[in-house]
Image (cartoon, grey):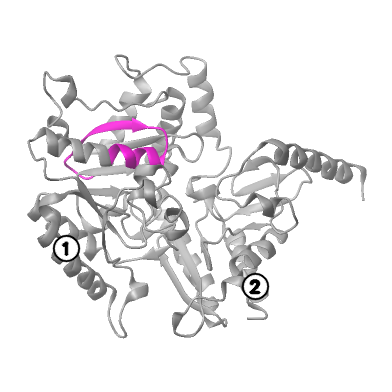
Amino acid sequence: MGASVAKGFAIAAEWRTRDLRSVWHPCTQMREHQSDLLPLIPIRRGEGIWLEDYNGKRYLDAISSWWTNLFGHAHPKIAEAIAQQAGQLEHVLLAGFSHAPAIELAERLLARAPKGLSKVFYADNGSSAIEVALKMSFHSHRNQGDMQRHRFVTLSNSYHGETLGALGVSDIPLYRRTYAPLLLQPMFAPSPDTWHALPGESGQACAERAALALDELLQKHGQETCALILEPLIQCAGGMRMYHPHYLRRARQLCDHHGVHLIADEIAVGFGRTGSFYACEQAAIRPDLMCLSKGLTGGALPLAAVLCTQALYDAFLDDSRERAFLHSHSYTGNPLACAAALAVQDIFDSEPVLQQNKTTAERMAVLAAPLVELPWVADVRQTGMVLAIELAAECRRPLNAAHRTGLRAYQHAISQGVVLRPLGDVLYWMPPYCIDADALERLANVTRDAIIVATNGL
């Protein structure tokens, strides 16, 4: 072993030791980090689609660092925008004050948003955006004298975040079960995802069947419902389950009929992930509230935005302070984060991002197609720049949980320099948009090998 490599291993070991002494990691059973089951990897730097550890080993970031990174790590335009803003104004409270980056970003977000969204409220992260949207919906109904509406409708298998309000409208037992006594009790409408399609049933027909169930629910409970909240087109944390845009159109119609707000959680699917700038565009609908985060800053800094209609905003205008929306975060509309988000908007304006993504998505589809022939691969599905491979037993029964198939796939991929962090037994690709043909081919090959290794012995 060369001296430089040995030094790298020593530095990595030191950081790992210090980390495990003081840091509690998210979405992790920390006991696994204390063994070789899930080795902790200190990262020294990032560039483009690559992360690099202290040993000089590079990892293809196939999941965009939890779906945040759009244009690659350390993107020079985004980094320059942050540095320039840091020399002018790092932060100022947004209560009673304002600044150019927050104003300009709001203008540009609204210019791209579905027509009818006219105001932007800033928050710090995706879960916070959901909290804002839920409170806005509930409060606006009260401000208009409708005191009956105090419940929310969400979809089965949905995920909207892990603060209590956001978790309260989520439906993944792994996250919800422990905190159930603390949570909202929403009404659950069947998910329209095509995994549940009947034999011979099209995606649109599956969506219509789910819409009919939503209609029935709202006929019974519409008068007490504040809003329907959903993730347009893809239920991401729910296993990258995908559905037909027809459901969004029907949901919009049903919400209008019953006076219910429609909240679109575009936190993971916005900014080009699904093939259009916003996923809602594919159904040609306008939600009453739209939540944005993750790709908003290109993955550089935490920031969220909730876009709402003029009618909803107007419901809070009054001389009474109690009718105002008294919700705040210390770093609301942070100038550094807004500057990063403006740089992201500049990239979309100056480069043919969506067209390039279409070409990349087509290549992803070609490379993933052979995976469906592997044993235990039950489904390969794709929406835009998101592709999922679901592993299951016959008749789509779940695999034996004790086998830890997803974890085995992750371990193999990491050993080969690819970050595939599965959702249970669902492997997925959600790479930065700058991924090239060679990296895609490597991703496909490693994924194939990871599936073979992980399912060995089933």
Q: Within the image, what quadrant is residue 438 found in?
A: bottom right
Q: Residue at 50% across / 45% down in the picture?
A: 69
Residue 128, how many percent across, how many down?
38, 37
Q: Can you identify the residue that label 1 sits on?
A: 217
Instruction: Identify the residue under disc 2.
Output: 454
Judged from the image, the secondary structure of the residue bearing numbered disc 2 is: helix
**From which residue to which does the magenta span run?**
114-133
Disc 2 packing (10 Å; few <14; some 14–19; many ≥20): many
Extreme residue toward the front, this view: 181
Up/down of 131 relative to 430, above or below: above
Q: Is residue 439 above or below residue 194?
A: above
**Is 6 in front, or is 60?**
6
Q: Check if residue 118 falls in the magenta segment.
A: yes
Image point 15% across, 28% down: which residue? 316
Task: Assess whether residue 51 is covered by the magenta stretch.
Answer: no
Can residue 149 be seen here? The reply is yes
Residue at image point 69% right, 51% down = 33
In the rendered image, which quarter is residue 94 located in? Answer: top left
